[in-house]
Amino acid sequence: MSWTSNIFCKANRKFLLDVIIIAIPIILIYIYFNLKTGDTKETFNQNKHIEEKIDSVKVYNEFISEKIVKLEENKQIYNDIINKNNELINENNKELSKLKRAYNDKIKTVSNYNVAQLDSFFTKRYKEYYNR
């Protein structure tokens, strides 16, 4: 022990202080880059694994986003088709209403016919059944 204390006593204190100030950062940098503990290595491995999962989720998310865009386009096309069909149904309903009114008027006028007029109407209409 006395030998080490003699070395420090003989050495210039400013020189020792300079060596310590330079050596400490160099040692800390060396420890940081070269002496990674097991926990640190395990953490880095876990981080790499998590980053791989995140990348795969991003790819899957992009795929899903593309599918959503395509589905929305198809939805718009189907909505247009449905709207056209609804318009056609409304037109058909209007025509049916007109036909109902016309047939209702004809049915009401039947009550104005006498027996001979009804007989001639049905004879003309169902001629093939009467001739049997």
Image: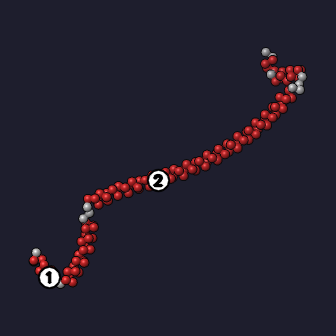
- Residue type highlighted by circle 2: Asn
User: Residue at coordinates 10% horizontally, 75% vertically from top-left?
Assistant: 1
> Is 13 placed left or right of 129 in the picture?
left
Q: Decide: is 62 above or below 132.
A: below
The reply to whether residue 120 is in sight is no
Residue 29 appearing in the image: yes
Say left or right for 8 vs 88: left
Reply above or below: 54 against 111.
Answer: below
Q: Secondary structure at mark 2?
A: helix
Instruction: Identify the mark at residue 40; answer none if there is no mark.
Output: none
Where, quadrant-wise, is the C terminus in this rendering?
top right
Q: Residue at x 39, y 54 (%)?
A: 53
Q: Is residue 7 left or right of residue 36?
A: left
Residue 51, percent from left and from top: 38, 57
Which residue is rendered at x = 82% and y = 34% of the image?
102
Above or below residue 18? Residue 124 is: above
Under mark 1, the amino acid is Cys
Q: Are marks 1 and 2 in contact (CB under 8 Å)?
A: no
Q: Few, some or many C-alpha atoms within 10 Å of disc 1 (few <14, some 14-19, many ≥20)?
A: few
Nearest the viewer among 99 and 4 is 4
Answer with the quarter of the image where residue 47 lies. bottom left
Say the numbered circle drawn on residue 9. 1
Q: Which residue is mark 2?
A: 61
Q: Nearer the viewer, residue 68 or 39?
A: 39
Residue 30 drawn at (x, y percent): 25, 69
